[in-house]
Amino acid sequence: MKHIAYTRLISLALTAGLLALAFLLPPPPALAQQPTPSDDAVNAIASQLYCPVCENVPLDVCGTQACAQWRDLIRQKLADGWNEDQIREYFLTQYGDQVVGAPPPRGLNILAYVLPPLAFLIGLFLVLRRFAPRAPANQPAPIVSDEAIARLEAELQQRKADASMEDE
Amino acid sequence: MSAALPSKTSPRRISWAVIVAFILLVGFLVLLGISLSRAQSGPPEVGDTAPEFTLTTFDGQTISSTDLAGKVILINFWASWCSPCAEEAVDLEQAWREYQPTGNVIFIGVDYVDTEPEALAYLNEYDITYPNGPDLGTQISRTYRITGVPETYLIDASGVVRGVKIGPFTSLAEIQQFVGSAYAP
């Protein structure tokens, strides 16, 4: 009986010791979750960028080694927690404006956004102005001298007289 | 006989909108012309004054062509994805090791539209020790209006282009001959 009591005492002490150790040890460090971005997520951004070496080919459908490296770079940036705008800005800084389909609205590029609508508005204005119904002109009648009126009346009278003579 | 009536016609006035539209059209055409002219003008030719540039290397060093006045500069445009660039990489490095002790010739590598990990791996693979850096915003390649990679330009001590090589060098002797057109030890 005494042996069993000792054994239970030792096992209780061991359990208590292990529990105390578990509480005293620092917790393991929490690591950031870094799931591998899917091809769809990569291509969603890649489709807005263009191949650096072949003209007018979007990055998501480009088969060159340079494009493959760029897609890997997008995947890496996404895994690092970058968002779409940050990645796009990074590519613009690294590789210039030609990597995006539409030029960023800064510097002379602004003309590409301002000129077409401005030209359209001016054209619309000119067309409307040309074809819009005009209000009747409120201009004074041309001034004709009394002498000219008298001459006209005399000429009319003469023509009437000539006409009646021809009828007779 | 009849009296002459005053004429109803008056000088036609040009609308301000027409003037603005005309100015915009002319301005647009001028810009288009300048852009086309730039796009169609090729790379610098032998005898041209070399365009100035500034490069920040992969290890953070800033190199300006104006600071290198008085030295012969060899600028090599390359990329890690470019197979012909790899063909000349060893010969370029060997030539650099020959010219570096003179202190009068400097080789500069400009990494064109590349990704940094692959570029660094390329430099490591070919043991390239001359200064290299990314062409940020493709500014240097646009200044030199390169048509592809590899392309190499040789600038003499007075800042004039003395050599243009489109495509890879095929031997060390070819590089030595190229540099020799601007530098005699």
Image: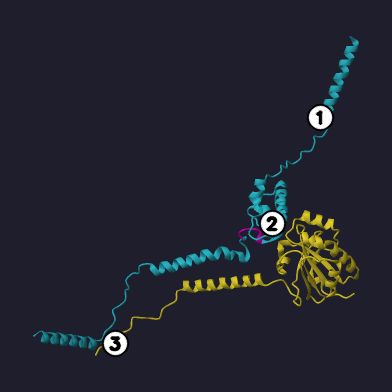
Chain colours: A cyan, B yellow
How far apart, in angstroms, are the residues tagged by discs 3 and 1? 118 Å
Q: Residue placed at 23% from the left, 89% from the top?
A: A147
Left or right relative to B9: residue B108: right
Which element is circle 1 on? helix
Vertical comparison of B93 with B161: above or below:
above
Q: Label 1 lies in what chain?
A: A
User: Is A150 a magenta residue?
Assistant: no
The residue lying toward the viewer, choosing from B125 and A129, is: B125
Spot occupied by residue A16 in the image (x, y as percentages of width and height): 84, 23
Q: Residue placed at 77% from the left, 55% from the top?
A: B116
Residue receiving disc 1 = A23
Left or right relative to A163: residue B88: right
Which element is circle 2 on? helix
Disc 1 crowd, CA 10 A, few/some/many (<14, 14-19, 20+): few
Spot occupied by residue A148 in the image (x, y as percentages of width and height): 24, 87
Q: Amino acid at mark 2?
A: Phe
